Amino acid sequence: MSNVKEMAKQMRIDIIEEVAAAGSGHPGGSLSVTDIMAALYFDKMNIDPKNPKWEDRDRLVLSKGHVAPALYAALAEKGYFDREDLKTLRKNDSFLQGHPDMKKTPGVDVSTGSLGQGLSIANGMALAGRMNCKNYYVYVILGDGEIQEGQVWEAAMSSAHYKLDHVIAFLDFNGLQIDGTNEEVMNVNPVDEKFRSFGWNVQVIDGHDCDAISAAVDEAKKKAGKPNIIICKTVKGKGVSFMENEVGWHGTAPNAEQAAKALEELRAI
């Protein structure tokens, strides 16, 4: 597991370098979801970077597509493309745009960005796997502000109706969205009870504990006949002192001085 934690540290450094080089992007949510990404890509997912379209691979749906810098960092560290390419984020003609594009970026299983749609896509992938006698898992990462979208709950009903136990969802629960706190904008609590009432297996964990994240995936795989959600309590901007729990860093890139301070802090962890 030490390798996973080291990867999470490197991914946070990559995220700051990506967004700073682009001069735009979403550092806050990217840093909150990093440990989930690291645990999946470096411990749990059955994938092959040399064969991104392998039919039996596990899938990942980044429903909150605006945190693409975290996904790109994971893919680069995993070997899907060169780390130097990260510096091209959001540049013209780059294959690393502000939201994931499955037609351009190796390792991206689905294009995302319009919030609220990822769980529906994950359901479709899981149903296709069942029909084709495949045993892969579909991981989907949702934002806590994102679940204010009605389609999420239509999809949640479908997941349970079809008993999609190969859908494992993560909720990045950092409590903030672009306009303020979730409670101010549209309170989503009690989110654990809501998913249970929709027929899901629910776990609530520390979303920055890589061991706990991997253990929760193992536990989810033991549960047959129901979809699974792992609610991860996280900190927006995790790892950078002046970004943590600050809603202003939802979609703001650091300037050169701020980036240097952030990188100094992250390298010292």
Image (spheres, grey):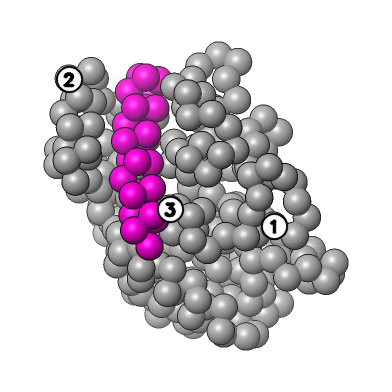
Give the number of the disc on residue 257.
2
**Which element carries disc 3, helix, strand or loop?**
helix
Q: Residue at x 43, y 74 (%)?
A: 216
The mark that comes first in sequence, 3 or 1, is: 3
On the rendered structure, is 268 left or right of 227? left
Image coordinates of residue 262 in percent, x first then y, are 20, 33
Identify the residue under disc 3: 38
Q: Residue at x 53, y 44 (%)?
A: 78
The mark that comes first in sequence, 3 or 2, is: 3
Give the number of the disc on residue 57.
1
Q: Quadrant of residue 151?
A: bottom right
Asked if residue 232 shows in the view, the reply is no
Numbered range of the magenta stretch:
1-24
Mark 1 surroundings: few (<14), some (14-19) or many (≥20) residues within 10 A? some
The mark that comes first in sequence, 1 or 2, is: 1
The type of residue carrying mark 3 is: Ala
Q: Quadrant of residue 192?
A: bottom left
Does residue 170 lie above or below 53 as drawn? below
